[in-house]
Image (cartoon, rainbow, N blue to C red):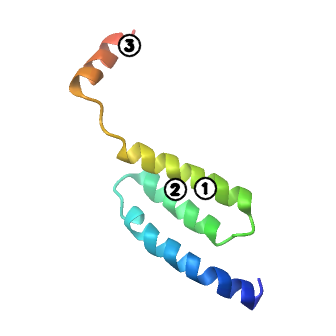
Amino acid sequence: MSKQTAAAVREPLTRASTAAAPHMRCSDPAVFTATEQLLNALSHVEDTARLEAAHGVFGRAVNAATAPRPSWWARRRAVRAEP
């Protein structure tokens, strides 16, 4: 990587690391792992496939961790519907 390229990506990488800090402290291990993988993928910015895959995993982990819990009635119906 040239000095010019490194200088161009330094600021976005710094912002991404700062934004990732709260996710690294998340109690959900899937969010922690996905954040770590995304930061690792960001360090290899030329590998867009890896970056896109890590971004997708990160998004799914955060969505799952922040999804509202089903109501008591919905959980009860789900238990009744199981064979």
The x and y percentages for residue 65 are: 38, 47
Q: Which residue is mark 1?
A: 54
Identity of the residue furthest to the right in this view: 2
**How many numbered discs?**
3
Q: Which residue is mark 2?
A: 34
Which residue is more in the foreground, 41 or 6? 6
Q: CA distance from mark 3 to mark 2?
A: 31 Å
The x and y percentages for residue 12 are: 57, 76
The x and y percentages for residue 46 are: 75, 69
The x and y percentages for residue 36 are: 52, 63
At 60% from the left and 83% from the top, the residue drawn is 10
In the rendered structure, the answer to whether residue 83 lies left or right of residue 54 reads: left
User: Badge 2: how crowded within 10 Å, few (<14), some, or many (20+)?
Assistant: many
The quarter of the rendered structure image containing the C terminus is: top left
The quarter of the rendered structure image containing the N terminus is: bottom right
At 41% from the left and 70% from the top, the residue drawn is 21
Q: Nearer the viewer, mark 3 or mark 1?
A: 1
**As drawn, 46 above or below 81:** below
Q: Earlier in the sequence, mark 1 or mark 2?
A: 2
| Mark 2 secondary-structure assignment | helix
User: Badge 1: how crowded within 10 Å, few (<14), some, or many (20+)?
Assistant: many
Q: Earlier in the sequence, mark 3 or mark 1?
A: 1
Q: Which residue is mark 3?
A: 82
Q: CA distance from mark 3 to mark 1?
A: 34 Å
